[in-house]
Image (cartoon, rainbow, N blue to C red):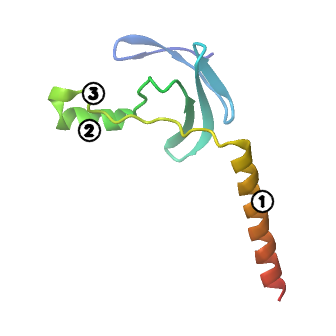
Amino acid sequence: MHGHGKQGGFEMLKLTIKPGEFINIGNDIRVVYSGGTDGNIHLLIDAPRELNIVRSKVLSRKKDSSENNYPHSAPSYYAEPKLSQETVSKIRHLIKEDKNTKKNNTQD
């Protein structure tokens, strides 16, 4: 932990983490820092479907365009369901076949 910061009059916990590290919020939310580029960070968020996770930029746009229906007008984003082991195996097999086909075509 790195200390606390003020944001909008509220005390906030300030953390420093490296790519690949994560923080847990309660028992069912995990935020993973996966790296970043100039001026951007990449976060992976694993949270229950009933939590609406929206970027601040999207919220401010929606709030400006539909003041009466805010925050219900903000879009919801949900994690994709996990693939079955059978599907993962099929995908791996297809990728392997594709690599072999490309390898054979370059040798001709």
Tell which tag, 2 or 1, sits nearer the viewer: 1
Q: Tell me the crowding category of disc 3: few under 14, some 14 to 19, or many 20 or more residues within 10 angstroms, Cα based.
A: few
Neighbour class for label 2 at 10 Å: few (<14), some, many (≥20)?
few
Q: Which residue is mark 2?
A: 61
CB under 8 Å between discs 3 and 1 = no
In this rendering, position of residue 78 left or right of residue 27: left
Quarter where residue 98 is shown: bottom right
Q: Amino acid at mark 1?
A: His
Q: Nearer the viewer, residue 23 or 50?
A: 50
Note whether 82 is above or below 101 in the view shown: above
Does dot 3 land on a helix, a strand or a loop?
Answer: loop
Extreme residue in the front direction: 86
Q: Secondary structure at mark 2?
A: helix
With 62 as the anchor, is 68 left or right in this view?
A: left
Dot label at residue 40 = none
Q: CA distance from mark 3 to mark 2?
A: 13 Å
Q: Earlier in the sequence, mark 2 or mark 1?
A: 2
Residue 41 lies, in percent from the top left, at: 53, 39
Q: Which residue is mark 1?
A: 93
23 in relation to 100, above or below = above
Per the image, the residue denoted by label 3 is 72
Per the image, label 1 sits on a secondary structure element best described as: helix
| Amino acid type of the residue tagged 2 in the rendering | Arg
Q: Is residue 76 left or right of residue 22?
A: left
What is the CA distance from the residue labelled 2 to the residue labelled 1? 44 Å
